[in-house]
Image (cartoon, rainbow, N blue to C red):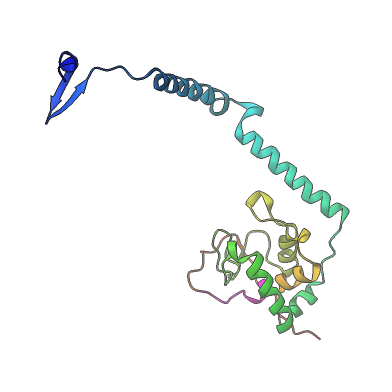
Amino acid sequence: MPEYEDKVLHEADGIREYDNPMPGWLMAIFWGSLVFAAGYLIFYALSFGEGTMEAEYRRETERALASVQAYFDANPLVPPSAAALLAGAADPAVLQVGEARFARSCASCHGEKAEGLIGPNLTDDHWLHGGSVDQIFQSIAKGWPAKGMPPWGRALKPEELAAVASYVRSVQGSNPPNARPPEGDPVAPEPISPRS
């Protein structure tokens, strides 16, 4: 290769580096990507006010919360009495329905034994949004969309909601292995009364 001898810049271990320019199409991609990156940075990362991703997220969250509230305003959910929910926590048939629905809908966040994964531990006596059986029912039905919990009141039948609330109340104090640490305020659990 004698025609390249005058263009050799470096040579080490038999490897020669030549002074050949990069192809034009590759340089166009390089400069185009730099211009795109600068524009993206200015438009998205450095923009303030209504155009930011955070503002868009907040608008979407508010719209989702308004949608949930509008649904429950149009379709009021009448919860069963606390006595009925507590009685369900002692009824094996209700607990079987509640456990099956919990496994399908809730275990992915709260764990198979309600020990808490990305969602909080439901087996201890600490609650983020109230720990009475009525408040548990409302939390399941209306959810906490801002914290990632969907409103199950639109997806489950009222008897399934009641069964899940009864099941959650029944697992309090079960102390499963690898449970998440307590979160929220301590709440003394209501006594479970057998169905009369």
Could you tell me which residue is drawn at 63 percent across and 51 percent down? 147
**Helix, strand or loop for the magenta stretch, by majority:** loop
- Is residue 28 in view from this perspective? yes
> Which residue is painted at 46% across and 24% down in the image?
33
Q: Nearer the viewer, residue 1 or 98?
A: 1
First to last magenta residue range: 167-176
- The image shows residue 49, relative to residue 106, as above or below, that is above
Residue sitting farthest toward the right: 74
Does residue 91 appear in this view? no
Name the spot of residue 188 as percent of width and height, x first: 65, 71
Pick the front one: 31 or 101: 31
Q: Is residue 140 left or right of residue 29?
A: right
Q: Residue at point 49% right, 22% down?
A: 38
Q: Quadrant of the C terminus?
A: bottom right
Residue extending farthest left: 13
Image coordinates of residue 77 in percent, x first then y, are: 84, 61
Count of numbered circles on the image: 0
Q: Residue furthest top?
A: 6
Q: Is residue 121 magenta?
A: no
Left or right of residue 182: residue 81: right
Tell me where residue 95 sits by quadrant.
Answer: bottom right
Q: Nearer the viewer, residue 125 or 109?
A: 109
Observer-nearest of 126 and 98 = 98
Residue 178 percent location from the top left of the image: 48, 69
Q: Is residue 33 above or below residue 104?
A: above
Where residue 58 sits in the image (x, y, percent)? 67, 39
Q: Quadrant of the N terminus?
A: top left
Q: Name the residue rendered at 87%, 57% in the picture.
A: 75
Q: Quadrant of residue 169?
A: bottom right
